[in-house]
Amino acid sequence: MKRRDVLRSGWALGTGLAVSGPSTMLRAATDNAAVTFPNGFLWGVATAAYQIEGGVHEGGRGASIWDTFSHTPGKTKNGDTGDVADDSYHRWRDDIALMKQLGVKSYRFSIAWPRIQPTGRGPANQAGLDYYKRLVDGLLEAGIRPFPTLYHWDLPQALEDAGGWPNRDTADRMTDYAHIMARALADRVHAWSVLNEVKTFTQAGYWDGGMAPGRKDPLAFLKSTHVANLANANAFRALKAVNPKVEVGSAYDCANCFPASDSVADKAAAVRWDKLINLWYLQATLTGTYPDLLPADQQAALLGWQAGDEARLKVPLDFVGINYYSGWRVWDEPKGNGIPNLNTRAEWAWSPRSIGKSDFGWDIDPPGIRQILKRMQQLTGSIPIEITENGIADNTPPAAYGRIHDVRRIDYLRRHLTELRNAIDDGVPVRAYHLWSLIDNFEWAAGYSQRFGIVHVDFDHGQKRTPRDSAYWYAKVIRDNAVA
Ligand code: IFM
């Protein structure tokens, strides 16, 4: 079946969980008129600790699962590690200055758990706390909202050694860690995100093994989903207990699920995959229940469910973070895939609407952001949404005279922001956009081979930062509160 035919079949809208037909007001990125955003819309950028900080042996930091994984031969491209990364552990002032120069209003960064609790438990490491206090104070001085994520994949290795995310104790360790951070920063940080992409770190970490800790155990994966959901709620309550006024959410990576053909079986598989990818985590948090997916008589045992978990899982998030990049192509897999009843095979990152691929090979599907927002709003209702990540790997090298003409990134951003504005017109309450990423950084298993930054980093020459054309373009978007 050709992409065009998938589109016509109606399933191109993802899972059959339809978005409404195009509004007559629909804006196109090719229109000449500027696309203006609502007053007060918050423009930001995002990074994560292990991807940018380096300084892995400094300030009393303990080892994380990513230190172990990246130092294991064959796990990352070229054997790359985050040992030095962008050296932001030392250059955070430069990064703040860059953001100030671009007019950025919100900085989504993450806190490295092993800097705070080197073994994932016990008292706080003062040097770690001091580092993030300095960063937060620097952001506030620059007029930038500090927006920390508590967990962006760098689990203390000692916790993995004790069983990792499939071990229920990890959810309690998260409570302690969140308490420590709230006591340290909740007087000056007003918006917190708990987990980044819980789907990805559980699935890639425990099921397909492509990311740390690299386990390939579907049943451990299932347990990890439940423990991570419990941890999410625990951290929410811990942050609120210290300062009830802070806003707490989490960042979910959501993606449209497209059946590989118009067969009944593939369509049903896409619906199942959507339940796992898009609902399994957020629905658990908002309602305390899981979508109907696993065999009912096995679910409790498969998840390690205990009496009272429904109440433990459920918290009223103040906002929902959505990360959007591409979509899934999904096939029925009658022979199964290790997860009872799931019976799917799915390929990231695909869309029947693709207008091209990023340098990472990910299909580019700008209307997909509007579609996924409308799909998730069926669950989130009126809860405010922040786009916590969106961006593209565009590896265009610097021109001889030093400028970096990343025209594909600008085109990508223009199209996605236009579709985001359409979603807002549709009634999706999106209040912020964080571009991934401020600077090129360690792209996990792909090492330094993929460049997501609007600021180029020369990793071979002292981590020199050079804003790309897209950085100047984004600065104008922020200034004008509009996409031209
Ligand atoms: O770099 C990652 C980030 O850490 C999580 N979301 C996707 C980005 C691009 O792959």
Image: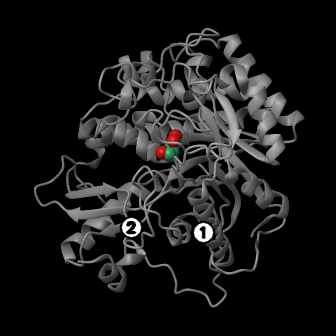
How far across and down, in percent of the image, does residue 85 sit?
56, 25
Q: Nearer the viewer, mark 1 or mark 2?
A: 1
- Farthest-out residue, bottom: 24
**Could you tell whether 288 is left or right of 186 in the image?**
left
The Cα–Cα distance between marks 1 and 2, rounded to whole angstroms, is: 15 Å
* Disc 1: which residue: 415
Q: Quadrant of the N terminus?
A: bottom left
Q: In this orientation, does residue 52 appear?
A: yes
Residue pictured at 39% horizontal, 39% vertical? 202
Where is 158 relative to 393, above or below? above
Rate crowding at label 1 as few (under 14), some (14 to 19) or many (20 or more) other CA atoms within 10 Å: many
Contact (Cβ within 8 Å) of mark 1 with mark 2: no
Q: First in sequence: mark 1 or mark 2? A: 2
Instruction: Say which element carries label 1.
Output: helix
Quarter of the view holding residue 244: top right
- Farthest-out residue, left: 335
Q: Quadrant of the C terminus?
A: bottom right
Camera-side residue of 302 and 10: 10
How far across and down, in percent of the image, does residue 357 sit?
43, 60
Where is 239 relative to 113, above or below? below
Q: In this orientation, does residue 189 appear?
A: no
Q: Amino acid at mark 2?
A: Ser
**Could you tell whether 60 is left or right of 136 in the image?**
left
How far across and down, in percent of the image, does residue 282 sit?
50, 54
* Disc 2: which residue: 351
Instruction: Say which element carries label 2.
Output: loop
Residue pictured at 63% horizontal, 26% vertical? 463
**Could you tell whether 175 is left or right of 330 in the image?**
right
Q: Amino acid at mark 1?
A: Arg
Quarter of the view holding residue 322: bottom right
Camera-side residue of 46 and 132: 46
